[in-house]
Amino acid sequence: MTTPTAPRLGTALARLLVLAAALLGVLLAGAAPASAHAALTGSDPQDGAVVATAPKELGLTFSEQVAMSPDSIRVLDPSGRRADTGEIIDLCSGAVVKYGVALRAGLPDGTYTVAWQTVSADSHPIAGAFTFSIGAPSATSVALPEQAAGGGVVGALYGIARYLSYAGFAVLVGGGAFVLLCWPRGAGVRPVQQTVVRGWLTLTGATLVMLLLRGPYTGSGKLADVFDLGGLQAVLQTKTGAALTSRLLLLGAAALFVAVLFGAYARRTDPKERKDLAFGLGLGGTVVAAGIAGTWALAEHASTGIQPGIAMPVDILHLLAVATWLGGLTTLLVALYRAPSVERAAVERFSRVAFVSVAVLVATGIYQSWRQVGSWSALTGTRYGQLLLVKIGLMAVLVGIAWISRRWTRRLAERAPTLPEPESGSEPEPEAEGTEKDLEDEGLENEGLADEAPDDEDAGDDRPADADADGEDAPEEIDPERAAQLARQRAAVATARRKKARDADPERTGLRRSVLTEAAVAVVLLAVTTVLTSTEPGRTEEEAARTGGTTAGSTAVPDRPVDFRLPFDTGGVDGKGVVRLSLDPGRTGANALHLFVERPNGKPLDVPEIKVNLTLEEKGVGPLPVAPDRIQTGHWSASGVQLPLPGEWRIQVTVRTSEIDQTTIEKNVKIG
């Protein structure tokens, strides 16, 4: 049996795929490798604080629940030795997520480095480091790793596997739905079968890779640790490990679904039996697909934050709608290029299914956007919000191209011959030889052209050379070389027929091109979605910025300046940065106040205005306003700042970055 050569897609397809690959590379290259979903909102002692005596423990506060291990928090002395006992202390209370580590007794003065790494509740690794000093700052020899959590080769491979898992899920679910809902006869078409099976293989392989990479991805970052069985066992005990394992088990059920769809269902000829089997496959396939989608919902974004009980089923619906639309689009593209006999009615049915999928996507997407962003400022001022705007733009482009495809579909329907539509699963009645329907539906899309009967005009060519002129029976054995030559001739004739049919049908050609463009945009859209799922939500980022300086302050060392850093975000252009504040000598009486406003990269940031208020609530003093003078770009100063009484003072700093954008951040410090 000879398999025909698939028609070339042409230079237009090559250009579109190259463009899609380039855009995908740009998106993945621009993604931060350690994008966090939980955020460190405070510490005690805080970053840069100078404390008079060594604390008994160090505490870290997070925006959401995290998974801690004995090495999640490390405190290193100036020489790089461990200054903590390795004992993680659960300090959580109510909605406050706080963990600490006990410090060794008798720590000497100097600068200590705190390095922490953990996994947020939505499965993404987060890490960071800061310093504090006991007695007085000192030099430190601690060198922290430059590679961020979830970065490097392991992070890149894990990100690729995540993308492939989404793509495989879309093709598997969308391809199966396309066959059952739109084109039942496609169950017997080899290119369609191959597409769905490859979707299953891609999702299964990507899931296995993610399971093996999970340990080094959230831990050491070393590729060699993939083979650490102890690390794999630890991964299996986590929520993400359980989700990946469940996905593999569900993929076993999905393999059975694929086998029945392209086996028993494709061979059924009785309409009633075929309809009953289609109902069972549809019901079972929906359950399995929802279960696979649930492995993402239970382990990632939807499982944390506000309203998880609503967010998880909404996320499952969102994933199923994406898969039905984009996976069905992929299968339609394959059918249009490699199985030209796809019925016009099938294209029309998919157009209706895609419309419903888009409606579900819009409804669930609006809820997810509100849940993850929460405000207009986060939509434009955070990386998550900006990526979300890109995704919305791509969705709009995709819907516009889909509208063009629907127009081509209607034109196909208008030109369709007036024939009774065949029942589901049955072959269409043959027309007169040589018609367009005959060229498209005589079985060229199936496994090979050797199975089809030759046309009358080619009948003589199919007979062996030694057959006599009187029509005597041909010998049973045919020369293999002659048989191969005849098979090649039939394949060439069939390819020419298909090309002739395509060239003679501009509507079908236009539909192919519009669907191909849809698929190229869908590749980029899926890449943006993958990056979004590994980026800190805008709501979390804004909450971390607001609470970054509100945790309990440290006791100031007598006669030493009070120095601390306060991150801020006003939400406008150039609205993010850090205020470094120094109060010298940091005691009652007159003090010199210095403020340094810096961008996130450490460079000075010029702001129109900055104000300070000092309040001692326990004594009812204040707020005492301070209006510092601008010394130079990013540097503001005020002299003779009076602190009349000792106690815990609240220092509020208001930063204005434009005519309308400003924010107030604060810090509590004890003045002796």
Image (tube, rainbow, N blue to C red):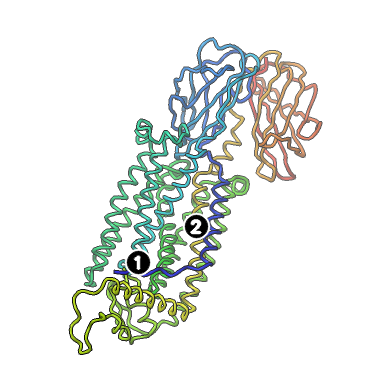
Quadrant location of the C terminus in the rendered image? top right
Residue at which label 2 appears: 523
- The reply to whether residue 184 is in sight is no
Q: Image height check: is 41 above or below 560? A: below
Q: Is residue 665 left or right of residue 635?
A: left
Residue 451 pos. (x, y %): 28, 73
- The reply to whether residue 325 is in sight is yes
514 or 160: which is nearer to us? Answer: 160
Residue 656: quadrant of the picture: top right
Disc 1 residue crowd, few under 14, some 14–19, many 20+, Cα 10 Å: some
Residue at which label 1 appears: 181
Q: In this view, which residue lies farthest toward the top?
A: 106
Tell me which numbered mark, 1 or 2, is placed earlier along the sequence.
Answer: 1
Q: CA distance from mark 1 to mark 2?
A: 23 Å
Point 58% across, 19% down: residue: 112
Disc 2 residue crowd, few under 14, some 14–19, many 20+, Cα 10 Å: some
379 or 322: which is nearer to us? Answer: 322
Point 73% across, 26% down: residue: 624
